[in-house]
Image (cartoon, rainbow, N blue to C red):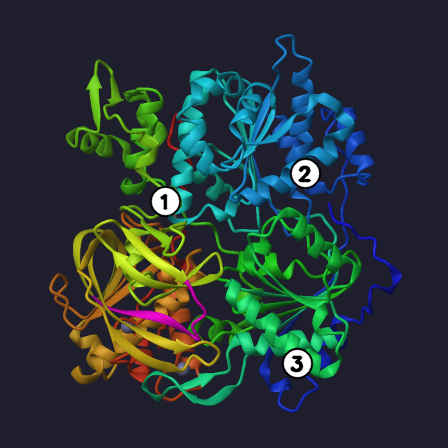
Amino acid sequence: MANDQLPPEAGVHPAPRTVLDRLTAGADRAARITHTEHLPPRPGRHAPWPEQIRPEVVEAVRAAGIERPWAHQALTAAHALRGESVVVATGTASGKSLAYLAPVLSALLDGSEAPNGRGATALYLAPTKALAADQRRAVRALAEPLGKGVRPAVYDGDTPVEEREWVRQYANYALTNPDMLHRSILPAHPRWSSFLRALRYVVIDECHTYRGVFGSHVAQVLRRLRRVCARYGSDPVFLLASATASDPATAAARLTGVPVAEITEDASPRGELVFALWEPPLTELHGERGAPVRRTATAESADLLTDLVVQGVRTVAFVRSRRGAELIALIAQERLAAVDRSLPGRVAAYRGGYLPEERRAIEHALHTGDLLGLAATTALELGVDVAGLDAVLLTGYPGTRASLWQQAGRAGRTGRGALAVLVARDDPLDTYLVHHPEALFRQPVESTVLDPDNPYVLAPHLCAAAAELPLTEADLSLFGPAAPGVLTQLEGRKLLRRRGAAWHWTRRERAADLTDIRGGGGRPVQVVEEGTGRLLGTVDAAAAHASVHEGAVHLHQGRTYLVRRLDLEDSVALVEQADPPYSTTARDTTSISILETAAEIPWGEARLCFGSVEVTNQVVSFLRRRLITGEILGESKLDLPPRTLRTRAVWWTVTEDQLDEARIDPEALGGALHAAEHASIGMLPLFATCDRWDIGGVSVPLHPDTLLPTVFVYDGHPGGAGFAERAFHTAARWLTATREAIAACECDTGCPSCVQSPKCGNGNDPLDKRAAIRLLTRLLRDAPAPQEEVRPEARPGPPGA
Ligand SMILES: [Zn+2]
Ligand SMILES: [Zn+2]
């Protein structure tokens, strides 16, 4: 719960406008601002708690300093009390926890008076261990006056064996994560029978993080949970909390498999927010193929952080990597030392992996104003209370509008204005966004994309389910339309065997070990520290060749390692901690074949398709780039075997006539397709909640399956992840934005801000920026108007589930 009491000496609080004016006072600074958005303050709106909330709970909430709930909290609680699953999708610091905690605590108290002694239970799922620990602290503080009626306990990989039994038998609010549910709780469900029998609520916090392949896995884990609960006679209600997202009810229904109501109107008050978009200037340096290079977002953010600290403005700069965070803090400290010797100590770096006490100390120092500047990885996005800053710097677009608002929402406390600045990185998406503010400020937040029907995801969960309780025909509808086909395959592979009316798991090993729910399928490569033999983590098999090849600089939880050796036989990458002054990028060659066209839409003579493909990819070399400047230092060859991936793709074709009309001759064709492919991959994160690294692309002047010039964009995970499908459904909007992004770039022949890609397997050759614009213009002429585009069909849970 936010601490708003600040000592009076905590600092100055100039209006956000004034802060921005001072930032742009320098010689060529003002020109770097491409847009300023002013978001007016919003008053709060209260509502009474529903009557069924127990008076002790209302009293406990009051004792915590909350006299009356905001309207969205009361509304969420009302749904929960009626036994309706509900998702609350409101802004950062809008009090989502209280919205589900009030009904949950109330139910736990109701139950504690039950004659059988056990009473109702609730399960809380968080995407990270740290968040579950924070939640326990919050529940403990709130539930303190409620006495023994509420017994929260964390159950995760760190819970000592002797405590686990206590949790199973006595806790009535178990806080865990989907991994533990998958690996530990469900396989051992008989031990949890009394807990599961009484299970009233399942809370899914930060549910927007369950997207892509990980989200698809979690969706299947939740179906397994519902099946086991049904066996014990319970039918829990799902209470989900999400960052603001479009269509949260649809995504929540896809995740849980049950119908979910949505609460999206945020009734908490908000201070004024001034949001500036900032584009770093071009430098004298040259990148690949002589392209002009912009100043890095890291260097620019470090300058801005320095200036804000000098002004006494409390600021967090969000950065993707731990190393980036450390660099920004370091540069800012050096600059500050030149101004005043006391200032460097008031800036720090923050990243994931800190102990709770360390995090509290940093939060406290920020609250008191002892700390003025913090460069933080996005680990800070989850579970750490740093609401109430004066300014937030976003070093690069964080990938989704949802994250953007989550990060910007860290600035501003009740009744006080705040400043947010998005500093563009040198890539097409960031460049597009700083020149198209409407794409950030006039668009709803993207919906969360996941695909529980992916057979590669489904198969191991059917095995795990069969191991938990033999699978019956009646169970299949729960697991979705793909289940019967996958089941037949599993029988054929002798993983499951039918006996009587049910399928059984036949193997000795644990079925839950078949899959790592955070991985993408295939045997993950273990990343092991050479000197110590310590396992640092795993990398998806699909990504291993490109990310942990010999000589690769590998970031793990923000720390930097150098890969010594990749042993493909044993699926192990040996690494050592290092501090090279460069990053690495793999080069590869890719070919693709169409297995099945599932859907096809004519755009005049052009075709837009979606279906299954097989991608063959070989990593052949890697580049080293200097860290701060991005300058290329050299290329080294690699000797790795090709890999194949069966996945889903969206693709489009154009005809000879269309090429003629677009004045694209055969020499320009390859460069036009390739440039369009790159830019479209760069823009897809705007439409699907993916990272540009989750997807891949191939462009071919004459593809053997279509016999036409073709551009493919595919999901980089076996079986697909839902991103290509999303791209297919929003293709007119997606490709229109792609065309505009290329056309708006001020470079002559292509640069990282438009058509060059940092992950291009061909060294960004050939690329033809002008021809790509003409090609996309022609393609889009016969496309449906973007607003008429079919919305992706809502897919709630399967009937009868
Ligand atoms: Zn450009
Ligand atoms: Zn390329």
The residues tagged by marks 1 and 3 sit, at their Cα atoms, a distance apart of: 48 Å
Is label 1 or label 2 in front?
Answer: 2
Which amino acid type is shown beneath numbered disc 1?
A: Asp
Q: Residue furthest front?
A: 531
**How many C-alpha atoms fall within 10 Å of the one at disc 3: few (<14), some, or many (≥20)?**
some
Segment tinted magenta in the rendering: 577-589
Q: Amino acid at mark 3?
A: Arg
**Element type at mark 2:** helix
The residue wearing badge 1 is 451
Residue marked by disc 3? 335
In the displayed orientation, state which residue is furthest to the right: 8
Q: How many marks?
A: 3
Q: For marks 1 and 2, give the CA distance.
A: 34 Å
Between label 2 and label 3, give the one nearer the viewer.
3
Q: In the rendered view of the protein, which quadrant contains the N terminus?
A: top right
Residue 428 position by quadrant: bottom left
Q: Are marks 1 and 2 in contact (CB under 8 Å)?
A: no
Residue 444 showing in the rendered view: no
